[in-house]
Amino acid sequence: MTALTVPFKLPELKAVPFRPTLPYGFSEVEVAKLINRNMMRAPYPELVVQLEESISRYGILNPPLVRNYTVLDGYFRVEAARKAGLTRIPVFNIAGGPHENPMH
C-alpha cells in the first residue's frame, strides 16, 4: 500500500486554549468538584496518559456528560484533566435548565 502524497504543504497546527462561550446545557466547572464514582471499566493507565497529553495540548474537545457533579460519561477525560493539572473544564450538564441546575 502506498502512502498518500499531498501536492502542497499543510500548515502546522498550534494549540489554542479552549475558552469558548458555553451554550445552553454546557457549563464550566472545577475538576475537584466532579465525582467520578460510576467508573464502569477498569482504568487503563496508558489511555489516561494519552488523553492527558492530548488535553494538555488541545484542551477538552469532547466535554464529559454530568448530572449534579456526578460524571455519567467521560470518566477517563476527567481523570486525564486532573492529571494534566486543569482546575476547570467544560462539561455538558443534563440536569435541565438554570432553574433546576445546582451547578450555576
Image (cartoon, rainbow, N blue to C red):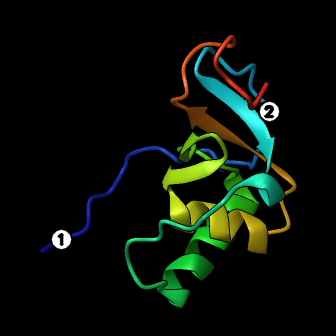
Label 2 CA crowd tier, 10 Å (few <14, some 14–19, many 20+): few
Q: Report the amino acid beneath label 2.
A: Arg
Query: Residue at left 58%, top 45%?
Result: 61
The residue to which callout 1 is attached is: 2
* Residue sitting farthest toward the bottom: 45
Q: Position of residue 98 (x, y in %)?
A: 69, 13
Query: Residue at left 61%, top 14%?
Result: 24
* Residue sitting farthest toward the left: 1
Q: Position of residue 8 (x, y in %)?
A: 46, 44
Q: Are marks 1 and 2 in contact (CB under 8 Å)?
A: no
- Asked if residue 19 lies left or right of residue 60, the reply is right
Which one is in front, 3 or 78?
A: 78
Query: Residue at left 76%, top 68%?
Result: 82
Seen in the picture, residue 59 relative to 40 is either above or below; the reply is above
The residue to which callout 2 is attached is: 19
Q: Report the amino acid beneath label 1.
A: Thr
State the image quarter where residue 93 is shown: top right
